[in-house]
Image (spheres, rainbow, N blue to C red):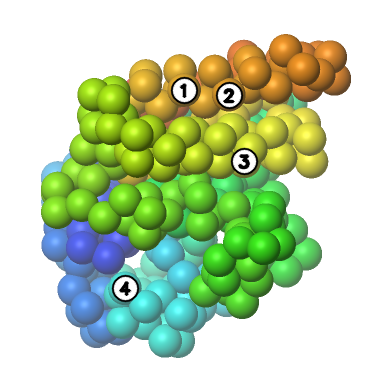
Amino acid sequence: MRVGLDIGGTKTDAVAVDAAGRVVHSLRLPTGFGADAVLQTAVAAVLGLASATATPVSEFTSIGIGIPGAVDPGAGRVTHAVNLGLADLELGARLHDRIGQPVRVENDVNAAALGAFHLEGIGPGRSMAYLNVGTGLAAGLVLAGRLWRGVRGVAGEIGHIPVDPAGPRCPCGQRGCLELYASGSAVARQWPSEDPLPVQALFAAAAAGDPAATTVRDRLLRGVAEAARLLVLTVDVDDVVIGGGISRIGDPLLAGVRRVIEGWEAGSAFVASLGLGERLRLLPVDFPAAAVGAAFVGEPETSTREVV
């Protein structure tokens, strides 16, 4: 039995995954703010899964965590997780002290990439990019069945590739980064809304003919298409799975991105040869990808078992 936790700014999703790759139990807890509260939430999640599955914590074969911020997987250290109130926390070591078992820690987007890989049941020889389109824009890469972090852990940070040198300044210090056009924060900046689901409201307004909403929606679709093209051109993955909060738009998002790609293909035989639109698909709504991926973090080889 493996355990995976996805610790987010407001909630923590936790899952228990059995030897066949099935999610046998899941739970959700509110996430506390600050180091002690985050640790207490994590301990409660692990103990809750142990009780629900009648499995002693000592018998879990893997305990993993996906968490935002800068993560050193080797040391289990998390830094700059602002929404959690974590400046510098040795999360893996401190949780180990609390529950008596080793804990592996990974960036939440990388963990979600592993979760998406297992969900799709992709074979170990295939490669996949998980494109997370949420408040920000980033990707996780699973190449030949294994998570690829890069030399300094920045592989997949495509949101900070500048696409417009004359564009607005990004919080990273550069100008015109892709994240400024293809993310929830980009929508909020360009099309302010009081709606609790602002991106869905944007798509609805665009469908109703609002010209301002149409401009922002189309810019978002082009940005997501550009992110997918960058991933294919740089690592030539078999599949690009789109997840994150904006993926909840569903078919209108996927169809819109594919329309952008079809326009490129009409003007470029090279782009047409990539089969880019065929590589795209959406992560199923409400699938706890980061939690499932965290359960598999640290394995030397990625299993081909399908997660149910």
Q: Comparing marks 3 and 2, which lies closer to the viewer?
A: 2
Q: Quadrant of the N terminus?
A: top left
CA gap, disc 2 and disc 4: 34 Å
Residue 227 image label: 3
CA gap, disc 1 and disc 3: 14 Å
Q: Identify which amino acid the numbered label 4 is placed on.
A: Asn
> What residue is drawn where x is 64% and y is 38%?
226
In the rendered structure, the answer to whether residue 150 lies left or right of residue 58 reads right
Front residue (pair 193, 102): 193
Mark 4 secondary-structure assignment: helix
On the question of residue 225 being in view, the answer is yes
Mark 2 secondary-structure assignment: helix
Instruction: Provide the residue designation for mark 2.
Output: 260
Which tag, 3 or 2, sits closer to the chain's start?
3
CA gap, disc 4 and disc 3: 25 Å
Residue 93 spot, x, y in % from top left: 45, 79
Q: Comparing marks 1 and 4, which lies closer to the viewer?
A: 1
Residue 254 spot, x, y in % from top left: 45, 23
> What residue is drawn where x is 67% and y is 56%?
164
Q: Comparing marks 2 and 4, which lies closer to the viewer?
A: 2
Task: From this view, report whether residue 22 is shown above or below residue 147.
Answer: above
Q: Identify which amino acid the numbered label 2 is placed on.
A: Val
CA gap, disc 3 and disc 2: 12 Å
Task: Tally the marks.
Answer: 4
Mark 3 secondary-structure assignment: helix
Density class for disc 3 (Cα within 10 Å; few <14, some 14-19, many ≥20) is: many
